[in-house]
Amino acid sequence: MIDWHIVCDFDGTITRTDVIDSVLQRFADPSWEAIENEWLAGHIGSRECLSRQLSLVKATPAELLGFFDSVEIDPDFPDFVDHVIGLGASLEVVSDGIEQGIARILARHYVSLLPILANRLRQVDHDSWRIDFPYASDACRAAAGNCKCKSTPGTRRVLVIGDGQSDMCVAATADFVFAKDRLAEHCERNGIPYARFDSFAELPALLALLPHARAANATTFNTETQELFHHV
C-alpha cells in the first residue's frame, strides 16, 4: 500500500490537447484569445477568464458532444489508473475545465469511476452557454475557477500531475509533482520537487522511486526526493 493522494489535471495532461482551447478555437468569437492573454499575463484569474470566454461560445449541445467524442487521451492513462488504485493510492481528476466533457471523454476510454472535480457548463439557450464554478474559493491565491488546493487532504501525501498554469499553485504545496511543459519549467524555476514526464507509461516506474512511507519531516522528504530524482 502507498500513502499518496494524486491530484491529476486533465487538459493537456490526460488529453493530448487543451480541450477548452479547442472548444474556443472551434466555436467562439476570436476575441477569446485576447482574454486568454490577459490570464497568461496574470492580469485576471481563470474564473474571470473562463466566464468571459465561454460566453463567446456558440454551439448546440449536439455540436459540443460531437467535439468531446473526437478528443483522444494518453492511451496509457487507463492502465496508470488501475496501477495506482491497485497500490492503494487515491486519485482525483481535478481540472479547471468542463466536468461534462471530462466525464464523457473518460467514459469513452473506459475510465468511468474516478472522482471528477471541475467546472460545470450550463446552457443559456439553444447555442449559448455559461460556466459555473462549484469548486471555486474566494481565498484562492490564483483566483482560479477550480481551487485545486482545496482537493488536497492533510492526512496523506499529495502528488500533483499536471502541465500548466492551473497546476502551479497546488504544485507549490504538494509533496511531489510529475510535470510536463510549463508546469515543469515552473517547478524548475521555483525549486519545487518534481520529475518531468511525457507519457503516463513512464509514471509507474517514477512512482516506484518515491518513498512509500510518510516522512516524519516534509523538508527531509522533499530534500531526499529531490536527490533521488536528480539523476532521473
Image (cartoon, rainbow, N blue to C red):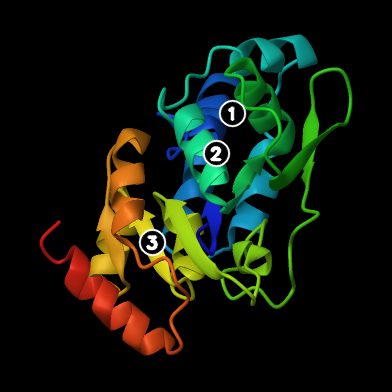
Can residue 102 be seen from the camera position used here?
yes
Give me the C-alpha separation between circle 2 and circle 3.
30 Å
In the image, residue 31 above or below residue 22: below
- Using residue 203 as the reference point, say whether residue 18 is left or right of it: right
Along the viewing direction, whichever of 166 and 106 lies nearer the viewer: 106
- Going from N to C along the chain, the mark reached first, 2 or 3, is 2
User: In the image, what residue occupies the spot 18% across and 74% down?
Assistant: 227
- Going from N to C along the chain, the mark reached first, 3 or 1, is 1
Amino acid residing under circle 2: Trp
Along the viewing direction, whichever of 213 and 69 lies nearer the viewer: 213
The single residue placed furthest to the left in the displayed view is 231
In the image, residue 225 above or below residue 181: below
Q: Which residue is mark 1?
A: 29
Residue 177's tag is: 3
User: In the image, what residue occupies the spot 50% across and 27% down?
Assistant: 22
Amino acid residing under circle 1: Asp
Query: Across the whole image, how many numbered discs are drawn on residues?
Result: 3
